[in-house]
């Protein structure tokens, strides 16, 4: 487009995105280019909870490929080992409110969760909690090639899922 606009010296410059190459003080991220992702409840209510690219913020950046059907487990914030006491999360999907890197480390890396759903507000503002249907952007570590996945859900969705789990329903 720059050439078409008269900038004859325009060019595409390609640089590695390998997680190792440094550009001044910044270490490049691994490349990440998702195509599609869907989070579905299969039982007891068959429905789509989130879908990428229809809602681009629904898929946390640097989530990795998977095809899993697993039970949902609520771990509250999910950022402290105490949040996991008495809960089996290995192979399951975790619902958490805490910072994504901490939840990923404790739930996925240390306890074997398949992935997680998050309502974490990556940036708090005076009005961040006003809209219970807002889905906030989230990201896993761009330097962790063994990430699982994280889907971002709204506070309303999380509240509804938590209430169902608390009543003994298996999702």
Image: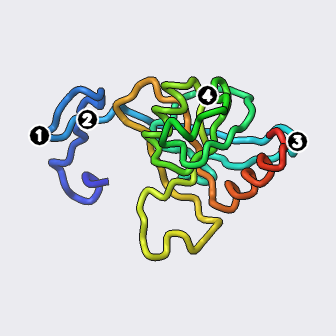
Residues 155 and 144: in front is 155
Q: In this view, does 16 lie above or below 6?
A: above
Residue under label 3: 44
Q: How far apart are marks 2 and 1 (CA)?
A: 10 Å
Q: Is residue 171 above or below residue 123?
A: above
**Along the horizontal axis of the image, is 151 left or right of 47?**
left
Sequence-first disc among 4 and 1: 1
Residue under label 1: 24
Q: Distance between the residues labelled 4 and 1?
A: 36 Å
Sequence-first disc among 3 and 2: 2
Sequence-first disc among 4 and 2: 2
Residues 131 and 30: in front is 131
Q: Position of residue 157 (x, y in %)?
A: 70, 56
Q: Which residue lies at the image location 66% right of the left edge and 32% below the top edge?
A: 86
Q: Which residue lies at the image location 39% right of the left edge and 28% below the top edge?
A: 144
Residues 138 and 71: in front is 71
Q: Where is residue 158 in the image (x, y as percent from the top left)?
A: 67, 54
Q: How far apart are marks 1 and 3 (CA)?
A: 52 Å
Q: Indicate which disc residue 171 carries.
A: none
Rendering quarter of residue 31? top left
Residue under label 4: 114
Q: Where is residue 82 in the image (x, y as percent from the top left)?
A: 54, 38
Sequence-first disc among 1 and 3: 1
Rendering quarter of residue 65? top right
Crowdedness near tag 4: few (<14), some (14–19) or many (≥20) residues, C-alpha within 10 Å:
many
**Along the horizontal axis of the image, is 98 left or right of 151?**
left
Q: How far apart are marks 4 and 3 (CA)?
A: 20 Å
Residue under label 2: 28
Sequence-first disc among 4 and 3: 3
Nearer the observer: mark 4 or 2; the answer is 4
């Amino acid at each position: 487009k720059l050439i078409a606009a008269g900038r004859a010296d325009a060019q595409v410059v390609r640089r590695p995105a390998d997680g190792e190459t440094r550009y001044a003080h910044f270490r490049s991220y691994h490349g990440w280019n998702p195509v599609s992702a869907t989070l579905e409840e299969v039982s007891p209510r068959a429905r789509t909870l989130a879908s990428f690219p229809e809602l681009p913020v629904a898929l946390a950046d640097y989530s990795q490929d998977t095809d899993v059907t697993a039970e949902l487990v609520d771990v509250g914030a999910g950022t402290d080992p105490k949040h996991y006491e008495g809960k089996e999360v290995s192979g399951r999907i975790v619902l958490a409110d805490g910072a994504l890197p901490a939840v990923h480390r404790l739930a996925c890396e240390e306890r074997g969760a398949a992935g997680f759903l998050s309502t974490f507000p990556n940036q708090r503002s005076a009005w961040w909690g006003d809209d219970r249907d807002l889905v906030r952007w989230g990201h896993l570590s761009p330097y962790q090639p063994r990430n699982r996945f994280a889907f971002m859900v709204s506070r309303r969705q999380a509240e509804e899922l938590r209430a169902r789990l608390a009543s003994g329903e298996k999702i």
